[in-house]
Image: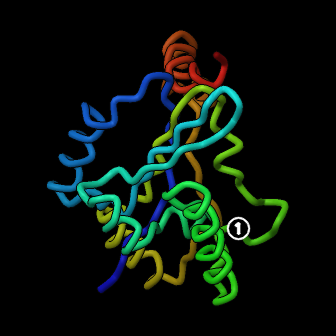
């Protein structure tokens, strides 16, 4: 079975409600076969930078620990306190030893935990894009391959006329408010 392109998205929250509207929207996207959430973690970072991690799924804590965390293995983060951080780091190291490299060069490494502002929370979503499988396969059949990807800031869309400056500033402010507080 082909797996679609997979993306790790890190979303910050000042006052998270992980059981509300975001979960409902992810469920709607899953039901429409647009995406599949492979794994999801909530990371709470206190004012001193200490973190607490919990699985965002219907698995019990024991099941989550038993099945492991795909996100944790990718970024070297576990879900059960200090022991979980160690096991997540081990899983990440084992994946790297088997040739799995999230970042091709060490200088390209993304320190996900460092990016989370103190006294906030983040949802780390590992998402498979089902909608993109036929497109990806067509590109591959045509001899194409992915060179790069990324989300485009609303501010960058002003120059090409997709947003007005005011719309872009409002969207940019909405997307980045927690980082500046």
Query: Which residue is at the far top?
Result: 166
Residue 46 as seen in the image, left or right of residue 16: right
Residue drawn at x 65%, y 31% as measured from the top left: 117
Q: Residues within 10 Å of mark 1 (few under 14, many from 20)?
A: few
Query: Which residue is at the far bottom?
Result: 98
The quadrant of the rendering that contains the C terminus is top right
Q: Quadrant of residue 153?
A: top right
Residue 44 as seen in the image, left or right of residue 28: right
Residue 24 as seen in the image, left or right of residue 43: left
Residue 144 or residue 32, whichever sits in front: 32
Q: Quadrant of residue 15?
A: top left
Q: Is residue 75 above or below residue 151?
A: below
Q: Is residue 3 above or below residue 23?
A: below
Residue 89 or residue 141, whichever sits in front: 89
Q: Quadrant of residue 179?
A: top right
Residue 87: image location, x then y, percent: 58, 71
Residue drawn at x 64%, y 83% as measured from the top left: 94
Q: Is residue 70 above or below residue 118?
A: below
Q: Is residue 44 above or below residue 161?
A: below
Please name the residue that numbered disc 1 is placed on: 103
């Amino acid at each position: 079975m082909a797996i679609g392109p997979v993306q790790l998205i890190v979303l910050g929250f000042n006052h998270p409600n992980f059981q509300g509207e975001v979960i409902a929207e992810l469920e709607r996207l899953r039901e429409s076969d647009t995406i599949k959430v492979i794994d999801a973690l909530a990371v709470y970072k206190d004012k001193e930078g200490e973190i607490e991690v919990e699985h965002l799924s219907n698995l019990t804590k024991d099941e989550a620990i038993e099945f492991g965390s795909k996100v944790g293995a990718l970024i070297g983060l576990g879900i059960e306190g200090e022991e979980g951080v160690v096991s997540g780091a081990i899983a990440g190291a084992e994946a790297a030893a088997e040739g799995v490299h999230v970042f091709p060069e060490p200088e390209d490494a993304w320190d996900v935990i460092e990016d989370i502002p103190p006294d906030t929370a983040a949802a780390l979503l590992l998402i498979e894009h089902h909608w993109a499988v036929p497109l990806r396969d067509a590109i591959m059949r045509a001899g194409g391959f992915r060179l790069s990807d990324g989300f485009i800031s609303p501010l960058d869309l002003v120059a090409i006329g997709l947003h007005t400056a005011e719309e872009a500033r409002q969207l940019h402010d909405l997307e980045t408010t927690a980082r500046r507080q």
